[in-house]
Image (cartoon, rainbow, N blue to C red):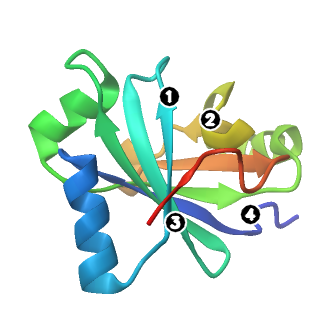
């Protein structure tokens, strides 16, 4: 059964969110961006849609969060790819049959239900799954 339906979003870690938004808009024509904060994760985000895929810029709000540690170790750039799925529990079950370990489900940006997959050691890339109930969220748009 094919559970991975599409690429839902790509996350990029950035040090300065405002500067990154300006650069993505100016150099690539990406935008408009919508801003969100995830205080529980210690990050601020800006997201824009290209086709059916979200580009999400993620910047740490504090030094003790995962994104701050990642930024210090790896610098700015690509962080993870998220696959869109119709049913998160079904997708987790199917991938676990294939030997892929999933973390705990949580609420992400814009009420997206997400789960991290433990793939970095074997595949060299962070992946997670996203099931969306609210697609465009409630955040304001940056012009």
Residue 3: image quadrant is bottom right
Residue 102: image quadrant is top right
Q: CA distance from mark 2 to mark 1?
A: 8 Å
Image location (x, y in percent) of residue 114? 67, 38
Mark 1 = which residue?
Answer: 38
Mark 4 = which residue?
Answer: 4
Q: CA distance from mark 3 to mark 4?
A: 21 Å
Camera-nearest residue between 99 and 110: 110
Residue at the far front: name it.
143
Helix, strand, or loop for circle 1? strand
* Quadrant (top left, top right, bottom left, bottom right) of the C terminus: bottom left
Mark 2 = which residue?
Answer: 108
Q: Determine whether label 3 and label 4 are within 8 Å by CB.
A: no
Asked whether residue 123 is in view, the answer is yes
Camera-nearest residue between 103 and 131: 131
Query: Quick one: label 2 or label 4, which is nearer the N terminus?
Result: 4
**Please, is residue 50 above or below residue 126 in the view?**
below
Q: Determine whether label 1 and label 4 are within 8 Å by CB.
A: no
Residue 48, disc: 3
Helix, strand, or loop for circle 2? loop
Q: Determine whether label 2 and label 1 are within 8 Å by CB.
A: yes
Q: Determine whether label 2 and label 4 are within 8 Å by CB.
A: no
Give the crowd class for mark 2: few <14, some 14-19, many >=20 residues within 10 Å.
some
Image location (x, y in percent) of residue 79? 35, 51
**Please, is residue 76 above or below residue 54 in the view?**
above
């Amino acid at each position: 059964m094919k559970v991975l339906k599409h690429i839902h979003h790509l996350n990029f870690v950035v040090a300065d969110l405002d500067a990154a938004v300006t650069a993505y808009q100016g150099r690539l024509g990406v935008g408009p961006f919508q801003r969100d904060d995830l205080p529980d994760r210690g990050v601020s985000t800006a997201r824009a849609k290209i086709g059916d895929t979200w580009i999400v810029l993620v910047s740490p709000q504090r030094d003790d969060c995962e994104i701050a540690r990642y930024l210090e170790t790896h610098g700015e750039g690509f962080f993870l790819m998220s696959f869109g799925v119709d049913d998160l529990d079904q997708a987790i079950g199917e991938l676990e049959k294939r030997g892929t370990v999933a973390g705990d489900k949580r609420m992400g940006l814009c009420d997206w239900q997400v789960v991290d997959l433990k793939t970095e050691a074997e595949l060299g890339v962070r992946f997670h799954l996203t099931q969306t109930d609210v697609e465009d969220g409630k955040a304001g748009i940056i012009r």
